[in-house]
Amino acid sequence: MPSPALSAEPRSQVDDPSSLVARFGAHEPLVMDAGVPLGPWQIAYQTYGRLNAEKSNAVLICHALTGDQHAANVSPVTGKPGWWSTMVGPGKPVDTDRFFVICTNVIGGCMGTTGPASTDPATGQPYTLDFPVVTIRDMVRSQAALLDRLGIGSLFCVIGGSMGGMQVLQWAASYPDRVFSALPIAAAARHSAQNIAFHEVGRQAIMADPDWRRGRYLIEGTRPSKGLAVARMGAHITYLSEQALHRKFGRNFQDRSAPTFSFDADFQIESYLRYQGLSFVERFDANSYLYVTRAMDYFDLAAEHDGILAKAFKGSATRFCVISFTSDWLFPTSDSRAIVHALNAAAASVGFVEVESDKGHDAFLLEEPAMFAAAQGFIDAAARVRGIA
């Protein structure tokens, strides 16, 4: 299958992205959990809507593993609509006619926020594996620095799904006084052993590619495309439910009526996964994939609070709505219930919605009217309390 058409060279987005950028000098380092002060550094972001005079209507969108800052605008790399255009925009649950919406590229990413593909000012070459290991808390800390730069003291709402939901929870734990409401979707307070295992398989696929060159492929002029494609293919299986896979593909052949008795992509599902792998390679950096998956693996919010998740939210005045999906086996409803139980134990204000869906983990990115209704209801209710028209 041919490579998808690109609107811009992905490499060009690393240091000078097609979005807003906040740059921090060496005297303003980002102190990371790995114990390394990172500086200078930058964070790339997009905004939608207008900040009101009271600065009370700011909403932060946190992206998932392979997302970026282009939540509701056309991607400069793929030319496709933003990854959450279903949720964010005029008249949508996150209504840009009412709210000032900010979406950042995470630290460790490859779309303009400093990461392993970024140029190390000390060498003039990409950081590669010299970049410090990243955590979810580092991502949130960098976002908080951006808000400080923008003069926004508090957020009306922090919203995100999957890894974005992890960031939402970390925001509520690290900066409770800055978060009026929080909406974690299809997320967990820690990564499971099974999910760590899937990530490790993906990382090993990348590192086994001879073109990975011990992470120095950008410097040596190669690209571990095959390894990264396999990593994406494996991960993508975890985003879909068995029902969704069967409904969409079944055992149907791809452009043929009988098997070829070869290792070609006989089945539609094989062709689909190969396309997903190929298109991903064109827009994502392999080392960033290593770093961001590792950040998810390390995430364990309770571990930061003596192993008791409720302590992470003790005394919190933040309003929460937790959403899960019945067919999500990557972050099953039991993970969301554990968050809700901890919030209840901390006497926090929390609502919970389990959406009936057969679309799997990726349901939060798709047309799901029940999710839209739940998010809209929660946001509207919180806005009334906040006094946002």
Image: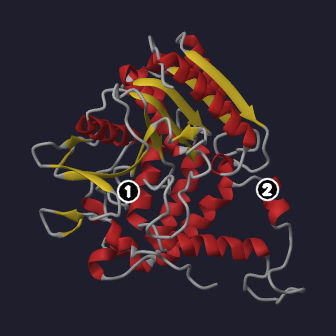
The quadrant of the rendering that contains the N terminus is: bottom right
Q: 368 or 239: nearer the eye?
A: 368
Residue 128, image x, y percentages: 29, 65
Residue 288, image x, y percentages: 39, 60
Q: Residue at x 55, y 61 (%)?
A: 81
Q: Residue at x 46, y 43 (%)?
A: 62
Q: Amino acid at mark 2?
A: Ala
The correct choice, above or below, for 334 with respect to 259 in the image is above
Q: 318 or 253: nearer the eye?
A: 318
Residue 83 shows up from this direction: yes
Q: Residue at x 56, y 34 (%)?
A: 184
Q: 387 or 167: nearer the eye?
A: 387
> In the picture provided, is 249 more to the left or to the right than 348?
right
Figure colour scheme: secondary structure
Q: Label 2 belongs to which residue?
A: 244
- Mark 1 or 2, nearer chain start: 1
Q: CA distance from mark 1 to mark 2?
A: 29 Å
Q: Amino acid at mark 1?
A: Gly
